């Protein structure tokens, strides 16, 4: 993705995401790059599947449970270390090749312009701006103040946070559910003007494995602004030692010339916090 993408912003996200994935932290690559374009996500899963099949053939076994990738070599400091390295190389190589040939084709600016012109001639003129509402009631947190560098540095796209007052998360606009994390802590939506929004509840809450969360929607479901998406147990999140800030990241923010965050202080669920133009 980083090599083939023509967008400078896409490259700026893809390269560091690749590095973090090598170190075992895959969320930036998954949510910030692959799921935005979908095909690379499928190719990555295929590459992982090929590596997993190879690992099963060699009866690869770790000495414990911990992070994977480069730090994972510490779990194979035995006679199987060369096999672990081989499996990783094959996985990355297969995913790279599949993505290069089948998973991503970045159109040039001229091609994109032609597509937009064709659409404008056949469809009604879309609204000039799209509004994004707050997904929870609470205190607005600017991107730079989010206590997580992945979000604070905009790796997953321009974003904001909200310190919630209650354990209910609502749809910020009329749209479609594009993804629901298996651990129930994150939901992806696509809305007006093609906005792709990742709602991520809490920091490192993936470690809770869905405990304390109850998702009310499913993938490909149409939702209306203000519709309940999921509930969260704020007390349980606190007891697990995780900040409960709810992040709202526009993962395709580099596709827009104008994205303004308009909120501050206390916001109510549904109140406009951003405008995309």
Image (tube, rainbow, N blue to C red):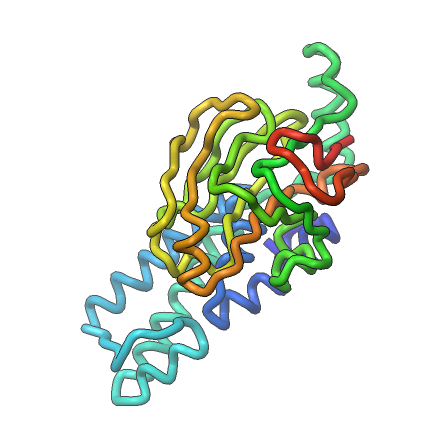
Q: Where is residue 258 drawn, in percent x and y?
A: 80, 37
- Residue found at the far bottom of this picture: 78
Q: Is residue 172 left or right of residue 10?
A: left
Q: Nearer the viewer, residue 83 or 243?
A: 243
Q: Where is residue 209 drawn, in percent x and y?
A: 34, 55
Q: Is residue 50 left or right of residue 103?
A: left
Whether residue 251 is visible here, answered yes or no, is no
Q: Where is residue 231 drawn, in percent x and y?
A: 42, 39
Residue at figure coordinates x 71%, y 39% from the top left = 255
Q: Where is residue 269 drawn, in percent x and y?
A: 60, 33
Q: 19 above or below 249?
A: below
Residue at figure coordinates x 32%, y 59% from the top left = 50
Q: 249 above or below 56?
A: above
The quarter of the picture where residue 74 lies is bottom left
Residue at figure coordinates x 74%, y 33% from the top left = 276
Image quadrant in which the C terminus is located? top right
Whether residue 74 is visible here, answered yes or no, is yes
The quarter of the picture where residue 44 lies is bottom left
Q: Nearer the viewer, residue 188 or 254?
A: 188
Q: Nearer the viewer, residue 219 or 223?
A: 223
How many dots with numbers? 0
């Amino acid at each position: 993705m980083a090599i083939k993408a023509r967008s400078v912003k896409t490259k700026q996200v893809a390269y560091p995401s690749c590095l973090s994935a090598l170190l075992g932290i895959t969320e930036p690559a998954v949510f910030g790059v692959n799921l935005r374009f979908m095909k690379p996500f499928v190719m990555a899963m295929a590459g992982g599947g090929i590596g997993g099949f190879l690992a099963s053939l060699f009866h690869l076994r770790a000495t414990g449970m911990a992070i994977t990738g480069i730090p994972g070599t510490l779990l194979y400091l035995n006679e199987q270390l060369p096999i672990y390295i081989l499996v990783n190389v094959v996985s990355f190589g297969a995913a790279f090749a599949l993505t290069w040939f089948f998973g991503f084709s970045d159109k040039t600016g001229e091609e994109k312009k032609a597509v937009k012109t064709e659409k404008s001639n056949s469809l009604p003129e879309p609204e000039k701006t799209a509004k994004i509402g707050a997904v929870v009631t609470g205190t607005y947190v600017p991107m730079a103040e989010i206590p997580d560098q992945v979000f604070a540095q905009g790796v997953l796209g321009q974003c904001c946070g909200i310190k919630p007052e209650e354990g209910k998360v609502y749809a910020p606009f009329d749209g479609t559910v594009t993804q629901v994390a298996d651990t129930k802590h994150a939901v992806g939506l696509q809305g007006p003007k093609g906005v792709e929004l990742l709602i991520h509840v809490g920091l490192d809450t993936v470690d809770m494995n869905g405990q304390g969360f109850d998702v009310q929607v499913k993938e490909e479901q149409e939702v209306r602004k203000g519709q309940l998406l999921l509930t969260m147990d704020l007390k349980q999140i606190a007891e697990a030692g995780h900040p409960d800030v709810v992040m709202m990241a526009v993962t395709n923010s580099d596709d827009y010339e104008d994205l303004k965050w308009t909120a501050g202080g206390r916001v109510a669920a549904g109140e406009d916090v951003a405008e995309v133009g």
